[in-house]
Image: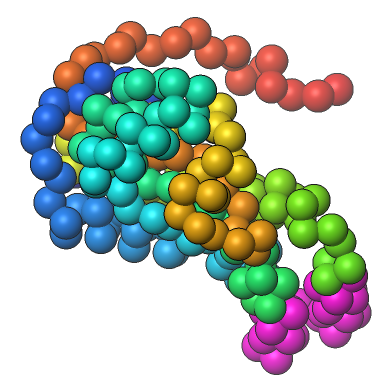
Amino acid sequence: MLTTKEAIERRRSIRKYRPDPIPDEHIRELLEAARLAPSGCNAQPWRFKIVKEADVKVRLAEAAYHQDFISRAPVVIVCCADRRRYLDGSVSGARNLERMGGVEERLAAVLKKRADALKTIDPRELGPRIAVHVAIAIEHMVLRALDYGLGSCWIRLIDELKIRALFGWNDDIFVVALLAIGYPAESPAARSRRKPDDLLID
């Protein structure tokens, strides 16, 4: 099994896949990795749709501005933020943190006040604001996939409204990204990265 460092170094965005099916237990392990991701106030706002059907993958590719490689991936995971789950989870999570002694009383009061304030935000604005929590869960899946020899590719260039309409989802669901998964049929070289010192702000 790879170390975390090795997984991070070996990860690539894969756009060519072998047609081999992915065992359901491996998909289940990816979801388990996502489930264990951290989120503010432990709200856990992520929701996932597993897509294997060829016709649905074609429509997802179309909704991703015709990135046709998506339709050829054995599995596409539609990664979403559930606005309602986030609002409910933030309030209960703030209370739980206080009860467990995870935060001091003063900070717990701030968290509860912020959670209540979120309820007044336009739902269209809330989705992008909570997408960061889902992004953490997605990266957990991306790294866990390497343990099974699977490659993946984040796709954020999407028409969120088209995808929501495809599945008949209401306004509570915000589509954060598509995650194509499969056994790689390519081995891309690592892309250039900035040096660690370039990441620091003076």
Q: Is residue 146 above or below residue 168?
A: above
Furthest-left residue in this view = 20
The answer to whether one can see residue 147 in this image is no
Residue 82, quarter of the rendered image: bottom right
Query: Which residues, given as a range, are shown in magenta?
Result: 91-117
Q: Is residue 168 visible?
A: yes
Q: Position of residue 7 (x, y in %)?
A: 33, 35
| Residue at the image position 17 percent from the left and 19 percent from the top | 185
Q: Is residue 180 left or right of residue 166?
A: left
Judging depth in this view, the residue of 30 and 194 nearest the camera is 30
The colour scheme used to paint the residues is: rainbow
Q: Is residue 15 above or below residue 139?
A: above
Please determine whether, in this image, residue 191 is positioned above or below residue 151.
above
- Locate residue 61 relative to residue 20 in the image: left or right: right
96 to the left or right of 180: right
The front one of 191 and 74 is 74
Q: How many numbered dots are placed on residues in this image? A: 0
Q: Report the quarter where the C terminus lies.
A: top right
Q: Is residue 160 magenta?
A: no
- Residue at the (45%, 39%) spot, across then down: 178
Q: Position of residue 180 (x, y in %)?
A: 34, 35
Q: Residue at x 45, y 54 (%)?
A: 167
Dominant secondary structure, magenta:
helix
Q: Name the quadrant of the N terminus.
A: top left
On whether residue 99 falls in the magenta region, the answer is: yes
Q: Position of residue 162 (x, y in %)?
A: 55, 41
Left/right of residue 123 with respect to residue 57 in the rendered view: right
Q: Where is residue 29? Give x, y as percent.
A: 26, 58
Q: Residue at x 43, y 64 (%)?
A: 35
